Image (spheres, grey):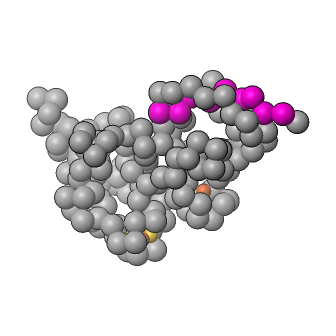
């Protein structure tokens, strides 16, 4: 079966050559060269491959291409830039909230989705939002502080 699925990623429209049954993570990494989303478990269980689909975090390892045609996909590459990082990106750096960094793209996606909903998340809400994201290095407490820092900076810049 031929490809030709149209996909909007980070605000740009693409005509995808991969077959509609292809896995979104493979399309992002291998066809579009967007390497931030990572392969971890391949079963929707670790969060390393998360991307935003219409603003909601989704496991791209578990998502067929056809199911996201016409939807807006955001990867970490679309969250911010080195010169203008998303507040969660700046806060993760400020809190030194990474060790190996393998999990961190998925964590950025989950945190960005939460911060788009509220800039006053409780610690419980942060823990719940990040619950699908596994980190084997044990950076959890620093990640939570980073989300709180990003939320505070977003509140301050909105004031
Ligand atoms: S690689 Fe997708 S959830 Fe683990
Ligand atoms: S920083 Fe290594 S898995 Fe999270």
Query: How many numbered marks, from 0 up?
Result: 0
Q: Determine whether 99 is above or below 64 in the image.
A: below
Rendering coords of residue 40 (x, y %): 58, 64
**101 left or right of 57?**
left
For this orientation, the residue located farthest to the bottom is: 137
Which stretch did the figure color magenta?
A: 2-10
Quarter containing ligand 2?
A: bottom left
Quadrant containing the N terminus is top right
Whether residue 129 is visible to the viewer of this picture, yes or no, is: no
Q: Is residue 94 magenta?
A: no
Q: Determine whether 158 is above or below 24 in the image.
A: above
**93 left or right of 38?**
left
Rendering coords of residue 146 (x, y %): 25, 56
The residue closer to the viewer here, 70 or 35, is 35
For this orientation, the residue located farthest to the right is: 1
Rendering coords of residue 50 (x, y %): 53, 50
Residue in view at x 66 percent, y 28 percent: 15
Residue in view at x 31 percent, y 36 percent: 118
Residue in view at x 40 percent, y 72 percent: 100
Rendering coords of residue 117 (x, y %): 36, 34
Whether residue 136 is visible to the viewer of this picture, yes or no, is: yes
Q: Determine whether 97 is above or below 150 in the image.
A: below
**138 left or right of 82?**
right
Residue in view at x 53 percent, y 33 percent: 9
Q: Determine whether 103 is above or below 65 in the image.
A: below
Quadrant containing the C terminus is top left
Q: Is residue 4 magenta?
A: yes
**116 left or right of 46?**
left
């Amino acid at each position: 079966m031929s490809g030709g699925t149209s996909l909007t990623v980070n605000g740009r429209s693409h005509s995808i050559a991969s077959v509609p049954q292809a896995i979104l993570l493979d399309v992002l990494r291998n066809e579009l060269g967007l390497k931030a989303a990572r392969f971890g478990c391949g079963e929707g269980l670790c969060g390393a491959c998360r991307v935003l689909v219409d603003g909601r975090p989704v496991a791209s390892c578990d998502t067929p291409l056809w199911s996201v045609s016409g939807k807006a996909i955001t990867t970490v590459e679309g969250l911010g830039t080195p010169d203008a990082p998303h507040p969660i990106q700046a806060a993760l750096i400020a809190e030194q909230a990474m060790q190996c960094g393998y999990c961190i793209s998925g964590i950025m996606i989950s945190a960005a989705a939460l911060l788009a909903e509220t800039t006053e998340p409780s610690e419980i809400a942060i823990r719940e939002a990040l619950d699908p994201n596994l980190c084997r290095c044990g950076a959890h407490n620093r990640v939570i502080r980073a989300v709180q820092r990003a939320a505070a900076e977003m509140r301050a810049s909105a004031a």
